[in-house]
Image: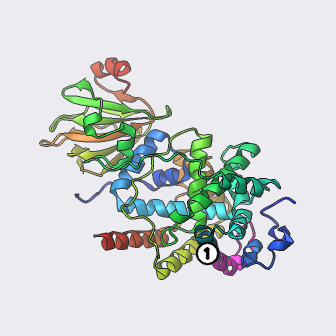
Amino acid sequence: MTIAAQPLEKTDAAFRGSPYDLATQVKGRLHRDDVRVVKTSEAMWVNAVERIRDEKDQEAFAALFRHFAPRVKAFLMKSGASPSLAEECTQEVMATLWHKAHMFDPARAGVATWIYTIARNRKIDALRKQRRPEPEDLPWGPEPEPDQADVMVLQQESEKLGEALAQLPQKQRELVEQAYFGDLSHSEIAAATGLPLGTIKSRIRLALERLRHELM
Amino acid sequence: MTEIKHHLTDELLMSYAAGNLPEAFNLVVATHISLCDECRARLGAFEALGGSVIDQVEGCAVSDECLTATLRLIEDGPTEEIRPQVTRQGILPAPLVDYIGGSLDDVKWRSLGMGVKQAILPTSKEASVRLLHIPGGTAMPDHGHNGMELTLVLQGAFQDDGDRFGPGDIEIADEALEHTPVAEPGQDCICLAATDAKLKFNAFLPKLAQPFFRI
């Protein structure tokens, strides 16, 4: 059986009824009606990563895989990878997710964001054949027990951002997508930066400031 | 550290978040973010947007064996080579230490005359990045650009067209700007500068010297 992102209802029967079943109902493209489902799914993805970290839970991994692997592959193909290279890289991205589950900090980024950064780094490495200079690590790692209120607010902000993207006029949304797939020149990108990023930005800044304060 | 007044643009942060900048620019962006929490938070927002884009993209079917193959890959253990943890060295944030392969003492400077020195760092060829050492009170050669130039101050300060750029500040210059940065008197100015095209020097001599110095 082929694992496809859409329609997701076709995932294997054994999977149905599992705690991750809800996620399989999330459509490839977000619409207004799906927002409630997505809210539930973000908390579930966080839980899935934690179960991989704590219990090496293969069922949780399979759920993440079914949702994200087809999307990671699409991202890599739209960035110029051949189908076979994209699939090979997708496997590496998803394996990295497993191995780095202990690095994931839900107070600082959503699961989709975290997977996105892993996929992006793989793209630079495998497609563009470059090293990626990374900013200095903050002097603190992920907190062992992140503040649940922080985690929830970040999830809400990520969802709001997702809604904002989904509700953009099609032309503008395509522009944003193209910016991430590498199809836009620098001057064209200026037109794609007009999204309301204010709230998530201040949320992340607040989290940074709090952590820095705690450290001192 | 003094307050950073000149930050990265949204375009640069978005392109960095998307992984579409030349390596030389990535290095300047990563170095600035190492010094600037404001831009680190803004980068976080653009990465979150990347997360939304990938979450909403129409997926591509993956083959039957893909999950099984991934689980096998996982059993083999992490493949990524473990790079030694690089830390900040004095005025040099970690990404820069990584590219220099050491501290400021390890930089292989080459003289450009007038006490100005540069060291080109190894990156992909779409753009180039260099460290510049400019004695206090000295002007950089008058130049314009064919493309974009990012200049990040690491030590000292320079003035350009009435603006002051101190440690952590980044100046973003494009083709339209013909400028003459002048290092402030006092402490020597050390900058990290990236260009995606050769600089156009206006004086006759530097133009001749250009092929030799790879400016």
Relative to residue A187, is residue A143 depicted above or below?
Answer: below
Q: Is residue B206 left or right of residue B150?
A: left
Residue B189 at x, y percent in the picture: 21, 41
Q: How packed is label 1: few (under 14 Cα within 10 Å), some, or many (20 or more)?
A: some
User: Element at badge 1?
Assistant: helix
Residue ID at (68%, 43%): A80
Residue ID at (41%, 60%): B40
Within the image, what quadrant is residue A54 found in? bottom right
Residue ID at (80%, 68%): A8
**Is B112 contained in the magenta span?**
no
Residue B94 at x, y percent in the picture: 36, 48
Residue B35 at x, y percent in the picture: 33, 55
Colour treatment of the image? rainbow
- Name the subunit of mark 1: A
Identify which residue, A45 or B78, lies in the foreground: B78
Within the image, what quadrant is residue B206 found in? top left
Q: Is residue A79 left or right of residue A113?
A: right
Q: Quadrant of the C terminus of chain A?
A: bottom left
Tell me if I can see residue A3 in this picture.
yes
Relative to residue A205, is residue B181 depicted above or below?
Answer: above
Identify the amino acid type marked 1.
Asn
Identify which residue, B207 or A48, lies in the foreground: A48
Identify residue for label 1. Answer: A47
- Part of the protein shown in magenta: A26-42
